[in-house]
Image: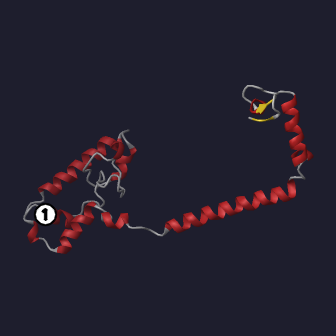
Amino acid sequence: MSLFPCMKLRKLFQMTRRRFASGGDGIRLMVADRQVVGHGINGRPIYFDSPDCPFPAIRYREVTPELCALCEKELDDWKKLSLDEKKQLYRYSFCQTYAEFQHFTPEWKLCLGVALWLVSIGIAISISMKTVLYGKLPDTFSEERQSAQLRRIIQLQMNPITGIASQWCYRENKWK
């Protein structure tokens, strides 16, 4: 067994690290010894589990000698690999399975609780403002004053084309 692919990967990592350490993209420095395997979102080599982009741009774990040995075994027949080795290879590339990061988490309860608290605080503030700060409604809000105001609008023929007065028939003295 040769470690040629593993050594080749390490040399590639060292070259990219040197290239980007001299004023390139700062995120590339955070990649460290993890293998860049794709373009990523917006061309940035960052890792996160997302159903929108299920294949991250970099591997989850850094290269170790144990993983190099597993990568060598991976090139042969997969039937020779044990279940644990297959899981280690998967965890080398991904932090969680698709089902794990799609799993419904209970944080929605916290969000709903905070939202309900904020709504209840807003209702309490509006009720207290209505009772404490606002005074009694003016007299113009009474029914008799509003009907008198409506009669005056009709008598003066205010806005006779599109307003309330346009709905009044002046010949018959009733609503159209």
Is residue 112 or residue 171 the one in the foreground?
A: 171
| Secondary structure beneath label 1 | helix
> Where is residue 111 drawn, in percent x and y?
55, 63
Q: Residue 130's image quarter?
A: bottom right
86 vs 14: above or below: below
Taking the image as shown, residue 114 lies to the left or right of residue 142, namely left
Q: Residue 47's image quarter?
A: bottom left
- Residue lying at the far right of the rendered structure: 139
**Total count of labels:** 1
Q: Residue at x 36, y 56 (%)?
A: 50
Taking the image as shown, residue 142 lies to the left or right of residue 93, namely right
> Where is residue 84 drawn, in percent x and y?
20, 74
Q: Residue at x 25, y 45 (%)?
A: 15
Q: On the image, numbered disc 1 is attached to which residue?
A: 74
Q: In what quadrant of the picture does the N terminus appear?
A: bottom left
Taking the image as shown, residue 6 lies to the left or right of residue 113, namely left
Is residue 139 or residue 60 the one in the foreground?
A: 139
> Where is residue 95 drawn, in percent x and y?
32, 64
Q: In what quadrant of the picture does the C terminus appear?
A: top right
Query: Disc 1 residue type?
Result: Glu
Q: Residue 77's image quarter?
A: bottom left
